[in-house]
Image (tube, helix red, strand yellow):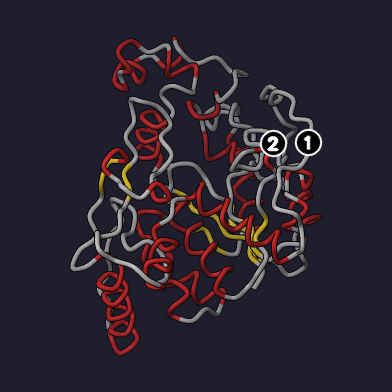
Amino acid sequence: MTVAFLKTHKTAGTTVQNILFRFAERHNLTVALPHPSCEHQFCYPRNFSAHFVHPATRPPHVLASHLRFDRAELQRLMPPGTVYVTILREPAAMFESLFSYYNQYCPAFRRVPNASLEAFLRAPEAYYRAGEHFAMFAHNTLAYDLGGDNERSPRDDAAYLAGLIRQVEEVFSLVMIAEYFDESLVLLRRLLAWDLDDTTSTPPLAPRGARRPRLRGARGARAAEARERLLRRCFGDEPVLRPAAQIRTKQLQPWQPSRKVDIMGYDLPSGRAGPATEACLKLAMPEVQYSSYLLRKQKRRGGVRVRPEPVLDNPPPRPIRALPRGHLGH
């Protein structure tokens, strides 16, 4: 019942987060959520601190929002026996997604003429500057998210990378793989001893590019049936991905990182009303809206007034500096 999910960038982490958020709500568990000064992430790209967690969401059972991994701080926040999980993706496909999504945020990407990925790949050193804000999106993002030093090159320092991998294997009970998403869900369910419904009460489509396994036997048939019931109840015969501008329901409009990127989402079919609509609304609600919803709910449960609190000091993120050898999030 206690799980910390390191949500890495552009790896289908939001889909796993959706599953964990809805699992927590189903079982009335407390979800660690960022303080308003951190917006909907735990003050990323700063090193995670327990101070970034909203006091109304402590002590938590589940943590699943973006952060930079810091083992000591997470252990200070989470109960003993917490299961640690993360997800990785094939790096080339992940980088293409990073380049498109953070094109207006990462300075290295903004320098590229005509926002050309090909131009960046031909001469990345012409655009990349170590230490800039959000520079990690242009260089070894997964190493940075995992608490490692993204400036250490495996060509020049293979021992550092090997040590980082060993430390990751020590901490994480499961490393999911985006390209094998359904198989990873099976492993997650077994690891956490979940019921079938706990992995089907989520937005209905797996990440683009995920390979679909065949579900065999009685258990696989039940999983397929549960999925089909969920689809029909909320979306009719088939859910349709839509651009945000075409989504009528404001609570379902996904956050857009820039005008050059169109993040798709789902909308409910017209003419639906009643309790089922509320359930389906929460089912398809994007991360930002669902995080706000959970925060309001947990405040009410704890008797906290649902009003803005004084924010924490939020200085500009610290420059990215090289970390000591063998370092993982300290």
- The one nearer the camera, 47 or 251, is 251
C-alpha gap between disc 1 and disc 2: 6 Å
Residue ID at (32%, 22%): 117
In which image quadrant can residue 186 be found? bottom left
- Residue shown at 41% from the left, 73% from the top: 275
Instruction: Please name the amino acid that badge 1 sits on.
Output: Leu
Question: Taking 243 as reference, is 259 above or below it?
Answer: above
Q: Quadrant of the N terminus?
A: bottom right
How far from the left and from the top, in percent, is residue 174?
A: 55, 63
What residue would you read off at disc 2? 37
The kind of residue on which mark 2 rests is Ser
Q: Tell me which residue sits at (59%, 18%) in the image.
A: 130
Closest to the observer, 274 or 197: 274
Q: Secondary structure at mark 2?
A: helix
Residue assigned mark 1:
312
Q: Are marks 1 and 2 in contact (CB under 8 Å)?
A: yes
**What count of labels does the image hold?**
2
- Provide residue 241's location: percent of width, then percent of height: 25, 50
> Image quarter for residue 127?
top left
Label 2 crowding class (10 Å Cα cut-off): few <14, some 14-19, many 20+? some
Q: Residue furthest bottom?
A: 218
